Each structure stands twice: as C-alpha cells, then as structure tokens.
Image (tube, grey):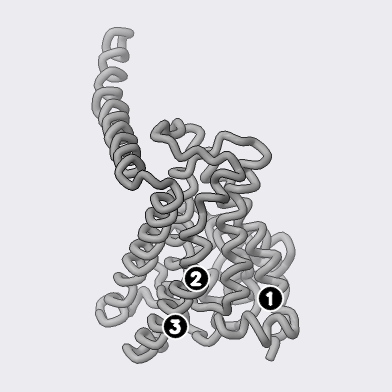
Amino acid sequence: MNVTTTQTVASALYDQLVIPGNIIVGYTENAWASYYAWMNNDFLATGLLFLVIHELVYFGRSAPWILLDHLPFFRKYKIQEAKIPSTAEQMECLKDVLIAHAFVEAIPIFGFQPICTFFDIDISANFPTLKMFALQITAFFFMEDTWHYWFHRALHYGPLYKYIHKQHHKYAAPFGLTAEYAHPIEVAVTGMGTVGSPLLYAYVFGQMHLVTIICWVVMRLFQAIDAHSGYDFPWSLRHFLPIWAGADHHDDHHKYFVGNYASSFRHWDYVLGTETPATARRHTFLKGSVEPEKKTA
C-alpha cells in the first residue's frame, strides 16, 4: 500500500468516525448549554439532571432482567437455574428500592451542585477530550473496586453484617433490582466509593467535568445491576476480559454469603485469597484461592 492510498484510507476513517463523533459531541455540548440556560439555576439543573438520569438508568436497566426471568428460553443462561424470582419477590424489592431512592438517595443526588462547586468540577459546555474521559473512567473503576472490596469485606464482620449488610443478602439468588436493595448505611458507604472516586481524583488532579461523573455513575449502575442479574451469557464481558468480575462472581457471593467481595474486578479477591472455591474452580488461574470465611449469622 503506497503513501497516497494510506492517506486516503486514513482520511476515509477520519470522515466516518471522528467527524461524526465530533458532531455528536458538539450537539451534546449545545444541548447541555441550552439546558443550563433554560433552567437558569445551576443547583436545580445539576440536581434534577443527576436524579432523573439515575432513576431512568437504574430501573431501565433492571427492566430487561425482569423480562428475562419470565422467558424460559433464557433459563439456560441463569446461574442459579432453579431459583427464579417470583413476581411477588420482584414487586416487594421494587417497593423497597423506590422507598430507599425517595428517602435515602434522592437528597444527596439532588444536592450535588454544592459539591461540584467545592471540588471545582466543571459544569460548562466544554466537554473533556475522549482521551481524558477514558483515562478518568478507567481510574474510577479501579478506585471504586478497591473501596468496595475493603468496605464490603468489613460489612461481613459480626455486628456490621447482622445489623447492616444482612438486608442485602435477603436474596441468595440475586436479580437486577437487588443491586441497590440495602440498608441506608450500606447505601451511603458503597455510594461513597462511586461518587468519592471522581471527587478524590478532582481534588488531587483537577480537570474534572460533571459529564464525566454522570457517565461514570451510569456505567457503575450498569455494572452493579448486571452483576446482580443472575445471568451469565457466552458474550458476557468476563469471557473476553478475564479480570472482569461479572455476574457469576457476585452471584457466588450471594449464594455462599462470603467471598468475592470486589465489585468490578477479580484481582483483590484472588491476591488476598477471598475467591469462593466455586468461583475459583471455574477459572484455572484462580486455583490457589482459599476456602471462604464462615457465614456470619
């Protein structure tokens, strides 16, 4: 391939990928600026945007898993095949989650603008570059996973499990809606890992945009809901990215009540020997994992 041909191909790829991407970003930036101008109140604009996105994503992503539980064709992908949540269980969980969202999560989510001001988080229509966006999102995944591992493991200690974390373990075979079915203290602790990761990054490095935080929260919701879905498909991410935890990893945590404490990745459980034996047997590189701690009553 000569130089002219290479330049032609590169130019074609640029026209097909970069230019449309820039157009989409430009359109989104204009919509963002128009929204904040229309609201004419940064506190209300940020709070309402964050809250609406959180609710739409959480329940929108949970809905397909509810549907799959009623379709026998997908039963072969169910991790705990014999344990299909009943409609009554789904509705009871939905009711409790709605109450928690209204009385526990809505206030800090809606009041996020003062935090943006304190940490100098950019809310302008000048979005970050794709490179910066990807770097920060990757950092958040690893930061949150570390936080989640240690605090989740701590919640399995005696009184902390009995009075706080036991609520989340009501369902030994989890389903999508159970991702945020938890005691208010646990919601706050795990939420600090999700929101605190970009805030810590902003404090140390600066250059943080609200759109990055929102996208990160959306991705974290997808990860948490999918991990609780109870389904493992041949196309699930963990089959292509071995370090990714996936639903099978967290499903074992609910099934055996201990082990597999991390959220997104497998390395902490592997290195510190807290993989459940059942999980380890499915992955040859995890054969050295130890027996999990005894279940806490």
Q: Is residue 126 visible?
A: yes
Q: Position of residue 127 (x, y in %)?
A: 42, 34
Disc nearer the start of the sequence (3/2): 3
- What type is the residue that disc 1 sits on? Leu
Do tag 3 and tag 2 residues touch (Cβ < 8 Å)?
A: no
The residue under label 2 is 248
Q: Secondary structure at mark 3?
A: helix
The residue under label 3 is 96
Figure quadrant of residue 76 = bottom left
Q: Position of residue 108 (x, y in %)?
A: 53, 62
Comparing 185 with 278, the one in front is 185
- What type is the residue that disc 3 sits on? Asp
The mark tally for this picture is 3
Q: CA distance from mark 3 to mark 1?
A: 21 Å
Disc nearer the start of the sequence (1/2): 1
Residue at the location (28% across, 26% down)?
19
Give the crowd class for mark 3: few <14, some 14-19, many >=20 residues within 10 Å.
Answer: some
Q: Residue 85 vs residue 24: left or right? A: right
Q: Which mark is residue 71?
A: none
The residue under label 1 is 155
Disc nearer the start of the sequence (3/1): 3
Residue at the location (28% across, 25% down)?
13
Residue at the location (27% across, 12% down)?
5
